Amino acid sequence: MSLDRTPPYLQVAAALRRQIVAGELKHGDALPSVRELAATYSISTATAQKVHRVLKAEGLAEARQGAATTVSTRRTLHRTAADRLEAALTTGRIYADGEYAVITAADLSEPPEWVGTLLGTEPGGRAVRRQRVTHNADDSPVSTSTSWFAGELAETVPALLETDRIIGGTPSAIEAATGRRAVASEEASTADAATPEQARLLGITQGAPVALSRNIYVDAEGEPLEVGESIAPAGRWRVHRSS
């Protein structure tokens, strides 16, 4: 474990958190026990107990009387656009085990002004739109999102206009067809109230609090490949990682 000013228990919690976000530790999996953490990371059992407490406080783990502490993400974890891009680039899979997406729309539409500005779409022009709802293994919706792409990709990457899932995600499909690789993402988040459509897709009450994120995937030249917006219900943790 690298030495820095971060307390050891937070370093270990961060390592486990990365595994949870990446889907390496899945919902229901047992976390390493206090003794296992102490042995693996050369920390005291008291420090290892703090690791468990941090993950429980973040809603990423739960403990039951007489049972192991297990990963708990179905109702608490919100995977961000940055998380999904990292998964696509490193594993070829954009969704973690137990998650699946239903594509609810795939067409050419006039984008919102903020999207058109980023993609360079002329006023009144059209861009490729893909809308989806992501579900957990228990079929509960965890987020709804809309991705936008430059209109010319409709011919270059025709799969973008189909409602079938694209294995490996849209970044991989675009790279295969154009050679342009998404290498980074930019993301901004805020709180909002669910619109009627968002409430219907997420199974929540209209006006209920939601987390709204806008993201951009950029290529090596800094040019946008994909611009998107994601909405998740309140109560789901967005985990930030820093190097």
Image (spheres, rainbow, N blue to C red):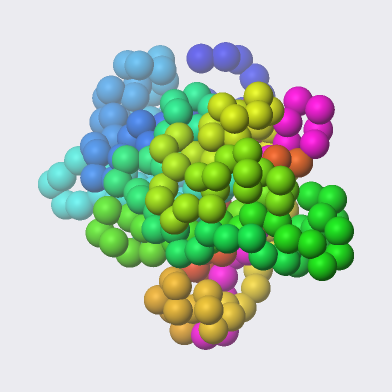
Q: Nearer the viewer, residue 155 or 103?
A: 155
Q: Nearer the viewer, residue 15 or 75?
A: 75
Task: Work out which residue is located at the far front of the displayed protein and give it.
Answer: 155
Seen in the image, is 227 located left or right of residue 141? right
Q: Nearer the viewer, residue 229 or 20?
A: 229
Q: Residue at x 60, y 15 (%)?
A: 3
Q: Residue at x 50, y 45 (%)?
A: 159
Q: Residue at x 73, y 36 (%)?
A: 218
Q: How many marks?
A: 0
Q: Position of residue 145 (x, y in %)?
A: 55, 59
Q: Position of residue 76 (x, y in %)?
A: 42, 57
- Compared to residue 162, the image places residue 201 above or below, namely below
Q: Nearer the viewer, residue 218 or 62?
A: 218
Q: Residue at x 45, y 64 (%)?
A: 104
Which image quadrant: the C terminus?
A: top right
Seen in the image, is 78 located left or right of residue 61? right
Magenta stretch bounds = 206-223
The image quarter containing residue 40 is: top left
In the rendered image, residue 115 lying in the magenta stretch gets the answer no
The image quarter containing residue 110 is: bottom right
- Compared to residue 120, the image places residue 204 above or below, namely below
